[in-house]
């Protein structure tokens, strides 16, 4: 039986047994049906397993539609990179105004008092990026 003749439930089971995000992505991109079926699952997987890293990627590369979908799936708008950069900071730094606006509209600007110089600098840059 060809793969595409399988029921959606079985295709979900296959994707749930793939261990790597890139494997799920490759499976989802195999054709339009799999993409429509598994794309939201892939976003949710990234949010749960990769701490919303795709939102940081979307902010860096100006992928507004991807950012919108991730936020719709409840991605963490306060996710941080290895350098403690948030999606808002990354989008502002790269000049992606649409994503900055999207993140601000979703309430991404949360002021926190933190003790290290790195965090204080980040807080300052996030606050000024709104202007």
Image: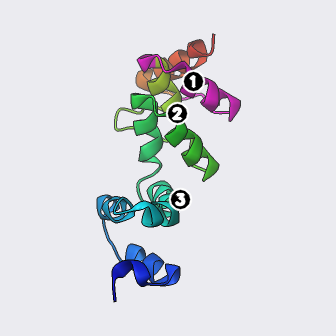
Q: Nearer the viewer, residue 97 or 4?
A: 4
Label 2 sits on a secondary structure element that is helix
Sequence order check, earlier mark of 3 and 1? 3
Label 1 belongs to which residue? 98
Residue 45 sits inside the magenta stretch? no
Q: Residues within 10 Å of mark 3 (few under 14, many from 20)?
A: some
Are the residues flagged by discs 1 and 2 in contact, CB closer than 8 Å? yes
Label 3 sits on a secondary structure element that is helix
Q: Where, by quadrant of the figure, is residue 101 drawn? A: top right
Label 3 belongs to which residue? 40
Tell me where residue 58 appears, x and y as whole percent.
44, 36
Q: Residue at x 31, y 60 (%)?
A: 26
Q: Residues within 10 Å of mark 2 (few under 14, many from 20)?
A: some
Residue segment shown in magenta: 93-114
Q: Where, by quadrant of the figure, is residue 29 drawn? A: bottom left
Tell me where residue 41 appears, x and y as whole percent.
50, 63
Label 2 belongs to which residue? 64
């Amino acid at each position: 039986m060809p793969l595409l003749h399988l029921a959606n439930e079985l295709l979900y089971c296959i994707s749930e047994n793939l261990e790597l995000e890139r494997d799920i992505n490759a499976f989802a991109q195999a054709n339009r049906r799999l993409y429509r079926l598994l794309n939201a699952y892939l976003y949710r997987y990234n949010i749960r397993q990769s701490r919303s890293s795709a939102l940081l990627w979307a902010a860096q590369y100006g992928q507004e539609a991807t950012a919108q979908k991730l936020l719709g799936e409840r991605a963490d708008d306060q996710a941080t990179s290895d350098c403690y950069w948030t999606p808002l900071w990354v989008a502002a730094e790269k000049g992606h105004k649409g994503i900055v606006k999207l993140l601000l509209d979703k309430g991404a600007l949360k002021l926190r008092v933190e003790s290290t110089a790195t965090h204080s600098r980040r807080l300052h840059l996030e606050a000024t990026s709104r202007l």
